[in-house]
Image (cartoon, grey):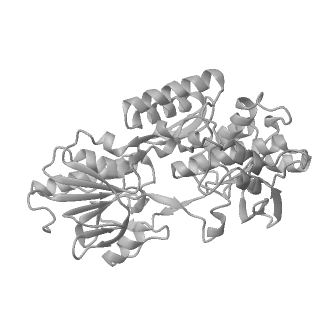
């Protein structure tokens, strides 16, 4: 061990997500000092981000201040820092402002969106990993309806009300289903010049069916439920170009390339490990996998560095059957618990256990009263799957207060079809005038310009989300 702490071993945890928070909390009764490093001051419940993006929940419903969660844990402190480098020779973590020594290090910084080498698509097709992503998607979706309401051009209205979602995994299906419910129900009486129900929602999936990671008949049931909501599914198709006004889609079977005019493209096609994975691999002298994940030993430590653990989406963990542990919240929490147990056993001079992943199943909600999923050998679908999904997600939310707020909001939405958090807020470096540029809408010359309306409305007032 290093001399990071003269009295108690110092555990540095990088990342306040599911894995990092689990490690920290599981060490609350262990004689160690824990420093939790994160760029944000809150823990985010990512599985419900799509509901923020579609106006059902507010950001505060699914984001909880880390200091509030750990308020009573006296051996833990939270430091708002971004890790820029790691030295495994000197056992030090380098941040933007300081150098922090450690005896044990747990790295759990998760994953980011993967655009497969087409980084120019990132600003044109936002993904869903952060609160900022969610509020930006919400702004684009609702802004498209507002721009269509102002337009007199039928072709432009059609383009504005066409929404393309790239990727038919759980996030893509959840976004598509929620968008369909917004346009068919929530907004049905809100506009005077357009019919929100005319919105075209296109889900582009490169496989044979959405949610094709699930066994049959679940993918076909998901496709049926999405189509019943009005979602158009294009399978065996791949997006090959994204522009501000359209996407180009190639059919993998016929190789035919078609153009689809749209002003809103949402990305749900893939993720890769956070950049810290590459930094850690370089420091350890090992190679990452194709997705940038860090290969780990059976106890989740890095080979050759038994005091450094990698957890969550950043870790490449092999299972006994040759498969890999999936990037799910329950898996990340189990890894966090494993790292904490290894540290605890080291301090008690006990042998470390190997990590054993316990598959608790996975579920994907499609829409109101319908979902699909697999729990063990049980294939759930329809209302039963939807109810299980609600219960499990509610139980995994960090604090009771947040659970209560989410439950109340879900109840209100279920009864009224209303999504009270459908607010158009400014995105980063955006304003109403840039929304016009994004949507391609031009004001009627006879009307005051949007730029003028914006400047007058801000006189003596201001605010942002």
285 above or below 313? below
Seen at 54% across and 40% down, the residue is: 373
The percent position of residue 97, horizontal first and vertical second, equals: 33, 66
Residue 48 or 312: which is nearer the viewer? 48
Residue 187 or 337: which is nearer the viewer? 187
Seen at 30% across and 65% down, the residue is: 297
In the rendered image, which quarter is residue 369 located in?
Answer: top right
The image shows a total of numbered marks equal to 0
Is any atom of residue 211 visible in this view? Answer: no
The percent position of residue 237, horizontal first and vertical second, equals: 73, 59
The furthest residue to the top = 415
In the rendered image, which quarter is residue 183 located in?
Answer: top right
Residue 136 or 237: which is nearer the viewer? 136
Say whether residue 331 is left or right of residue 202: left
Q: In which quadrant of the rendered image does the C terminus lie?
A: top right
The percent position of residue 163, horizontal first and vertical second, equals: 74, 48
The percent position of residue 160, horizontal first and vertical second, equals: 80, 48
410 above or below 100? above
Is any atom of residue 375 visible in this view? Answer: yes
Q: In which quadrant of the rendered image does the N terminus lie?
A: bottom left
Residue 226 or 114: which is nearer the viewer? 114
Say whether residue 452 is left or right of residue 91: right
Seen at 55% across and 28% down, the residue is: 410
The furthest residue to the front = 460
Say whether residue 65 is left or right of residue 464: left
């Amino acid at each position: 061990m290093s001399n990071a702490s003269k009295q108690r071993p110092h555990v540095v945890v990088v990342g306040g997500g599911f894995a990092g928070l689990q490690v920290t909390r599981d060490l609350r009764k262990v004689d160690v000092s824990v420093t939790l490093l994160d760029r944000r001051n809150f823990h985010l419940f990512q599985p419900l981000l799509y509901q923020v993006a579609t106006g059902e929940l507010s950001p505060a419903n699914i984001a909880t201040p880390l200091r509030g969660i750990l308020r009573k844990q006296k051996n833990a402190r939270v430091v708002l820092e971004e890790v820029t480098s790691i030295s495994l020779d000197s056992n030090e973590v380098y941040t933007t402002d300081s150098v922090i020594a450690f005896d044990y290090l747990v790295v759990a910084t998760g994953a980011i969106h993967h655009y497969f080498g087409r980084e120019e698509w990132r600003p044109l097709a936002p993904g869903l990993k952060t609160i900022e992503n969610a509020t930006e998607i919400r702004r684009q979706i609702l802004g498209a309806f507002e721009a269509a309401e102002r337009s007199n051009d039928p072709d432009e209205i059609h383009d504005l009300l066409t929404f393309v979602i790239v990727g038919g995994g759980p996030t893509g299906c959840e976004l598509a289903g929620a968008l369909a419910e917004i346009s068919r129900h929530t907004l049905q009486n809100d506009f005077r010049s357009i019919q929100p129900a005319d919105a075209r929602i296109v889900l582009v999936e490169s496989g044979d069916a959405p949610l094709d990671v699930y066994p049959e008949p679940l993918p076909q049931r998901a496709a049926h439920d999405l189509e019943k909501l009005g979602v158009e599914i294009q399978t065996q198709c791949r997006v090959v170009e994204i522009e501000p006004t359209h996407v180009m889609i190639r059919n993998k079977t016929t190789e035919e390339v078609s153009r689809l005019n749209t002003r809103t493209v949402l990305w749900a096609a893939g993720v890769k490990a956070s950049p810290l994975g590459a930094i850690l691999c370089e420091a350890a002298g090992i190679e990452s996998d194709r997705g940038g994940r860090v290969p780990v030993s059976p106890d989740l430590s890095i080979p050759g560095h038994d005091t450094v653990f990698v957890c969550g989406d950043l870790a490449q963990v092999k299972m006994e059957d040759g498969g890999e542990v999936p990037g799910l919240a329950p898996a990340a929490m189990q890894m966090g618990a494993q790292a904490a147990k290894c540290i605890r056993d080291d301090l008690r001079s006990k042998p470390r256990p190997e990590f054993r992943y316990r598959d608790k199943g996975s579920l994907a909600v499609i829409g109101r009263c319908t979902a699909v999923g697999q729990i063990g050998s049980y294939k759930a679908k329809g209302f039963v799957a939807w109810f299980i999904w609600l219960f499990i997600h509610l139980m995994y939310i960090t604090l009771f207060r947040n659970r209560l707020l989410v439950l109340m909001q879900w109840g209100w939405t279920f009864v009224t079809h209303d999504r009270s958090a459908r607010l158009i807020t400014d995105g980063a470096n955006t304003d109403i005038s840039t929304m016009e540029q994004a949507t391609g809408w031009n004001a009627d010359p006879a009307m005051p310009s949007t730029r003028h309306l914006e400047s007058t409305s801000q006189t003596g007032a201001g605010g942002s989300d």
